[in-house]
Image: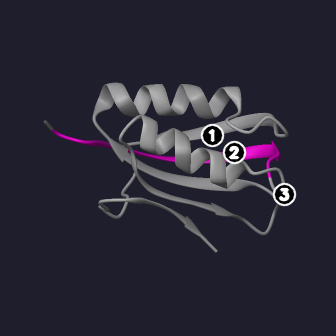
Amino acid sequence: MARDTAILRVTGFVQGVGFRYTTKHVAYKYDVSGTVKNLDDGSVEIHAIAEEENLNKFIDAIKKGPSPGCRIEHVYIYKGAPVEDRKTFDIVY
C-alpha cells in the first residue's frame, strides 16, 4: 500500500516539555516514520510518512498534544509534501 506524507508545524508551548520525545512514541504507535525537530522560532516541525489511516491518526494525536506539559496553539499541516523516505522516526537535534 502507498504511504502518504505530511509536514506538520506545531506552534504553542511545545519546546522544553517533552513534546519531541512523546511525538516519537506516538509515531511508533501508528507506524509512522520521519523526524521531529525544534525550530528557532519556538515551534516544532514534524516530517511524517505512513499509510493514510495511520497518518491521519498520528496527526489527530499531535493536534491533541502528545505531551502533558504542552499547549498547542496551532498545527499547520502540509499533506503530500516531499519528505525524505525513512524506516524509523527520529528526533533531530
Mainly helix, strand or loop, the magenta region?
Answer: strand
Whether the magenta-drawn stretch holds residue 66 is answered as no
The numbered dot on residue 4 is none
**Crowding near pointer 3: few (<14 within 10 Å), some, many (20+)?**
few
| On screen, residue 81 above or below 85 | above
Q: Secondary structure at mark 1?
A: strand
Horizontal arrangement in the rendering, residue 22 relative to residue 31 (left or right): right
Q: Which label's residue is closer to the chain start, 3 or 1?
A: 3
Residue that label 2 marks: 10
Whether the magenta-drawn stretch holds residue 9 is answered as yes
Residue that label 3 marks: 16
Q: Which label's residue is closer to the chain start, 2 or 1?
A: 2
Horizontal arrangement in the rendering, residue 61 relative to residue 48 (left or right): right
Q: Nearer the viewer, residue 76 or 61?
A: 61
Figure colour scheme? one colour
Q: Secondary structure at mark 3?
A: loop
Task: Give the Cα separation between the discs numbered 2 and 1.
Answer: 6 Å
Q: Amino acid at mark 1?
A: Tyr
The x and y percentages for residue 91 are: 57, 64
The x and y percentages for residue 25 are: 54, 45
Q: Amino acid at mark 3?
A: Gly
Q: Quadrant of residue 83?
A: bottom left
Q: Which label's residue is closer to the chain start, 3 or 2?
A: 2
Mark 2 touches mark 1? (CB < 8 Å): yes
Task: Give the Cα separation between the discs numbered 3 and 2.
Answer: 14 Å
Q: Quadrant of residue 85?
A: bottom left
Mark 3 touches mark 1? (CB < 8 Å): no
Q: Nearer the viewer, mark 3 or mark 1?
A: 3
Residue that label 1 marks: 76
Question: Which stretch appears magenta?
Answer: 2-14
Q: Amino acid at mark 2?
A: Val
